[in-house]
Structures are given as C-alpha cells and as structure tokens.
Image: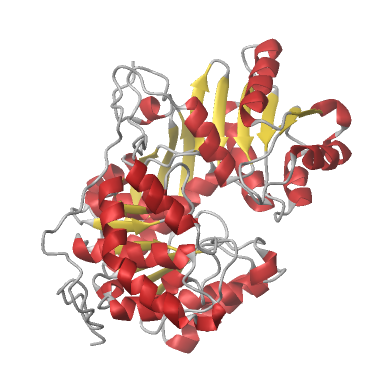
Amino acid sequence: MAEEGTAEAYRDPLSAAAAPRLWPTMNNDSHARVVAELLARQPEHQIGPSLERIQLLVELLGDPHRSAPVVHITGTNGKGSTAIMVDALLRAQGLRTGRYASPHLFDVTERICVDGRPVTAETFDAAWEQIKPFVEMVDERQIDGIAMTFFEVLTGLAFAVFADAPVDVAILEVGMGGSWDATNVADATVAVVTPIAVDHTEYLGSTPAEIAVEKSGIIKPGSVAVLAGQEPDVARILVERAASVGARVVAEGIDFSLLDRAPGVGGQVLRLDYAGGTVEDVLLPLYGVHMAHNAALALAAVAALHGDRPIEAEVVTAGFGDVIAPARLERVRTSPPVVLDTAHNAAAVEATVKAAVEAFAFAPLVVVLGIMRDKDVAGVLGALVDEVDHLVVTQPPGARALPAADLAELAQGVVGEDRVVVRADLADAIEAAVAIADESGPSAGVLLLGSVALAGQARALLVTESADVPAAAPTVSVTDDDWDVPDSLDVTRFGGRDWGSDA
C-alpha cells in the first residue's frame, strides 16, 4: 500500500492511505451566510475593469499588499499549478507563504492559503468582519457606478490575511487579464507569465497578441519578468513591456529550461536547468509535458526572487515532491478509473488529453464534458475529436452553463452522433461514463473536464473520506487578538497595525 502523503497515495483518494482532502466539509451556518453575502456582489466573470476600488480599499486598510514581496502570476493556462509549485518550493526553503488563487473548486476558503493550506472558515469569516466596514466605505463611493465586486473584495481579504499572518512571500494568481485585475494593485517582485492563448475574448482580445498586451501589465518597474515559452508575437510584446519599465527578463529556452522528462508511476521525473545550475531526478507528482514546463517556470521564478542564487538540490526535490494540485489530472476513482481536470479552453484541453493518454493509456477513452456558454466550445470539441471514443455531455452548475442539449447538438456535429451520450445531471453523466468504461474492458477509463465548476462538483461527488482519512482537511488558522476594527476608521492603519508604506 502506498505511503500516506506520497504521489501514489494522493492519486488514489479512495484507498485507505489516501492523502486528506484539501478542504473541510463545511457545515457552518455563519460561514454560509458570509459566502452568500459575498456572492451577492457582482460576480467575477462580470468584471469592472478598474483598479480604483481595490486601490481605495487597500489604502483604507493600511496597504497590506505591501507587507511582503510578491510573486505575481498571469497567463492563460497553468497559472494555478505554477502558483502551487512556487508555493511548495518556497515552503521547502522554510518560508511562510500566502497564496491567493481563483476560482475555487469546493469552498471559497480555498482561494486564500497560508503555508500551503486553505485558511479555516473561522479565519475567513473573521477577516471578512474585520474588513467589511472598509469595503462598505468603498461601496458608498460607487466608483464607475458600481460597488466592489466579489473578486475585488476577496483580493482585499487575502491581502489582509497575509499581512496579519504574517507571510514572508505572497503568491498572487491573476483572476483575469493583468493590467486591471484587482491583484495588480500589488507591485510584483517577480512577474510570471505562463503560456498565453485565447480565452475570455470578450474582455481581453481575440488573438494571443492582443491578450498579451493586457497580461503584460503585471510587469512593473524594477521587477523580474519570468516568461514561459510563447508564440513569437506574444514574446515580443512581453519583452517590449519589460524593456519599457526596466524589468529584467528571464526567458524559457534561454535562461531556464526543461531538459528532460520521463513519465512514471504517480507522475514524472524531470531534469531542470535554471540560473542555479542543473537539477537531476526531480519527482513531480503531476502528469503531462505541460506540467513539466510549469515546474521549470516555477523554479525559475523562485530563483529570481532570491537573486538567482542556487537552491540546494535537496530543497528543490523536496518542494516539488510535496506538490498537490487537486483536479489536475487527478484520479478520484479506481475501477474503472475516473480522472478529473479543470481544463476549459482549447489549448488546455489539448494538453490535458495528451497528458491523459500518456499517463493512463485509456482504451477506450470516455470523456465527460461540461462547459460554460461563453467558452470556445468548437475549439474544445476540436481538441477532443481525434482522441475521444465516447463523449458524455453534461453541464456545470450555474447560470453560465451551456445546457447539455445544446452542447450535445454541437458535439454530434463534430465527433459524430454515435459517439455522444447526453446526461444533463452530472451524477447521471458520471454513472453513464462509468458504465461505458465497465462494459469496454479493463483498459477503459473516464476523463472529466471542461469547467472548474464541473470538476469541483464531480470531486465533491467522488472523493469520500475513509476511516483513515481525517473528516476535516488540514487548514490553517490565522488569529491575532489585537486585530480589531478601531472605533474610528483610520485611513492609514488597519486594526492599529502599520502594514507598509509607499517608501
């Protein structure tokens, strides 16, 4: 049996030795009320492209976004996994980390992590009560005619939690774009750009180059820009931005690279090159060449944060060995195997399917697909057509979901009517996919993708506790008895604590 905490154990959550879930099962009325209050705000997919509201909030809070150096990560695909790897590498060096991620799979607390763990519901709720009066002050201003959005409030909340912990390094994942994303109120010490492709075209542009202009906005004067491999026109835009603000560039293929990789049980073994030299035999408990490149990017980012000083090989291997990335080709059922992924655009789906074929060799491959109506559905179906044997179409939760019947009609025109099954309810869709795999022999398997919300819902259905798995996941409580809202709201300090200055 696999040892608890190993890649093998984590990849089989239904085994007795499975690693604990990353979140608690919330059964807390007060937390539910807080979440409902936050979700009543303008949702994150309806952005208000401005930094004015978040800028005013952090000023009222006493500039908590300046309390620690920032690794800021943008791009189209790979932001979340790269952020998780940066987090793990920094913690392996003994540093306390704060990581802000989006969206969440199960509960909003997953977005704010300290020391690699989501904050507790109690910490999250207490932080909201502390900053709420300041948020309401910003709301009253109605900047650009709107109150603070859900994402802006969560960003301010993360900064407050990180400053109060306190953390040594803040790792910020951009929500959408770059220049006007709420996270960009912070000035990056290291600005990381993962591969840029086409997504969110209604806000960012219709070509990778147009999108790159927006995303390049996180590269600030004096920062280090760590760039993943990009299309030539995208690379030119990013390098020009760096030159215009005096940022040093660290580029994949020139300053760091993935030298070699070998797929293995529970992940892959990497050989990485970066400013500190070459690191051999790095076990990464994630699948696919895209994840291997993300690992190279994460290592380069951490090295840049430390002035390109070498990192001990043992620290690098320990950090990558501790990486846990839920719903990134995560196996959540064993017989037949069911694998979840959050891929939701054409480029991500193509990379994910290739990785799944390499890692699991499912034959036949049964795909469960649900997608939001504002995504490139044709592109996603095109990425699946040559690999999928059976396609079970469903729909994610939420008003933005493309109805299963509409997706089925589109899918039948691309992959053929004989390969498409329609099940609007996700539980029914999984059941149908599992039945197809069962009937197809021992090498068959199921891959679910198309939406973060869909992956989260599926994970809630399929990942269960066993007798050896704690009912509540490891979370971190950040408490400070002195962290109180003062009777009079001081615009230069939050809770009587000076978190930073413009100096």
The image quarter in which residue 133 lies:
bottom left
Relative to 248, does residue 440 appear above or below in the rendering?
above
Quadrant where the image shows the N terminus: top left
Relative to 312, does residue 497 appear above or below in the rendering?
below
**Is any part of residue 319 visible from this angle?**
yes
Q: Residue at x 66, y 24 (%)?
A: 428
Numbered disc total: 0
Depth check: give the residue in front, 178 or 230: 178
**Is any part of residue 295 visible from this angle?**
no
The image quarter in which residue 215 lies:
bottom right
| Residue lying at the far left of the rendered structure | 481
Q: Position of residue 349 (x, y in %)?
A: 65, 45
Q: Is residue 154 found left or right of 424 in the rendered image?
A: left
Q: Residue at x 27, y 72 (%)?
A: 64
Quadrant where the image shows the C terminus: bottom left
The image quarter in which residue 137 lies:
bottom left
Relative to 16, does residue 405 appear above or below in the rendering?
below
Q: Is residue 311 found left or right of 454 in the rendered image?
A: left
The type of colouring in the image is secondary structure
Q: Position of residue 108 (x, y in %)?
A: 41, 50
Relative to 34, does residue 242 appear above or below in the rendering?
below
Q: Position of residue 354 (x, y in %)?
A: 63, 39
Q: Position of residue 77 (x, y in %)?
A: 56, 55
Depth check: give the residue in front, 390 or 274: 390
Q: Residue at x 45, y 50 (%)?
A: 81
